[in-house]
Amino acid sequence: MKVKKGKDEKIFLGIAYVLTVLFAVICLLPFYLILVGSFTKESTILTEGYSFFLTARNFSLEAYKMAFKSPDTIVRAYGITIFVTAVGTITAVGLSAMTGYVLARPDFPWRNKISFFFFFTTLFSGGLVPWYLMCSKFFKFNNHVYSLILPCLFSVWNMIIAKSFMKGIPFELTEAAKVDGAGDFRIFWKIILPAAKPLIATIGLFTALTYWNDWYNSMLFINNDHLYSLQYQLYKLINDAKELRKIAAESGMVVDTVPIESMKMALTVVVTGPIILLYPFVQRYFIKGLTLGAVKG
């Protein structure tokens, strides 16, 4: 039997829907401004600032032409970033999930002592210089693709979320599987992982964003142009454009021939587009995984 909604409930839902739509529009406005700015003439941005409205008089593709002046470089950087993001995310999620599962098992006697060592690293660290020396001198990270993967491979925060989530999975499932003769890896693969889809989606999204947006490791460890990540390649492109503008200004040329401001917007569109498309696939798991990881103790 369908229950009719009361007047107060209808009013409340109406207000909630209106506020939700307004909030969504407010969140989308910056992306719309970026998109419009990427197609706006540099001279218009310098004289009138950014605008939400694009006219035929102000329309320009110069920013995208300059951004893709060397398409092979952008495509290669895309390939490096996609490879690093895919391999790094899959490996990092597996490590975080396995670590969280082990530390959440009540039959593991050293779980609290080992957890302390993980938590300790969130409070204190050796500093940037010792970390860089260890990575470059001992682990030989320089000019290798794995130097873009290994530094971000394990996150204590993701491990804490995984541990909290795993505590919500009944331990009786593990005990029943052991009685049936299943080993630890088979239990984890066949029972724990299917039950942890919200967790996988949550920490997978966090990790993928970390790898996709990373430019710092490229700056530290990579000197080979063919191994630059997308973010660092575009960072270099912006710096090169600034140098061109500086040279143009010193030579008496028109400064707005180098579209730095509009190119920033264009490069933002180039970078954020693919990763935004990932979110709808994990949205229904993301909220559940995040809230469960936050509530369980």
Image (spheres, rainbow, N blue to C red):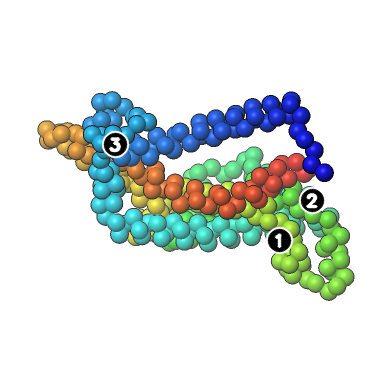
Residue 192 is drawn in which quadrant? bottom right
- Work out how far the residue at label 2 is from the one at label 3, CA to CA, in angstroms: 52 Å
Q: Percent from the top left, x then y, of residue 81?
A: 44, 56
Q: How busy is the neighbourhood of tag 3: few (under 14 within 10 Å), some, or many (20 plus)?
A: many
Residue pointed to by mark 1: 193
Identified by mark 1, the residue type is: Leu
Q: Is residue 266 left or right of residue 173?
A: left
Q: Observer-nearest residue: 122 or 175? A: 175
In this view, the residue farthest toward the left is 252
Q: Position of residue 24 (x, y in %)?
A: 54, 35
Q: Amino acid at mark 2?
A: Gly
Question: From the viewer's perspective, is residue 56 above or below residue 274?
Answer: above
The amino acid at mark 3 is: Thr
Can residue 228 be seen in the rendering of this structure? Answer: yes
Left/right placement of residue 247 relative to residue 229 reads left
Of labels 2 and 3, earlier in sequence is 3
Q: Quadrant of the C terminus?
A: top right
- Is residue 33 shown above or below 271? above
SS category of the residue bearing label 2 = loop
Q: Residues within 10 Å of mark 2 (few under 14, many from 20)?
A: some
Q: Is residue 224 visible?
A: no
Q: Residue at x 54, y 58 (%)?
A: 88
Compared to 236, does 75 lie above or below? below
**Residue 146: x, y in percent?**
48, 61
Mark 3 vs mark 1, CA separation in Å: 48 Å
Q: Which mark is residue 40?
A: 3
Query: What residue is shown with label 2?
Result: 168
Kind of element beneath mark 1: helix
C-alpha span from label 2 to label 1: 13 Å
Mark 3 vs 1, N-terminal side: 3
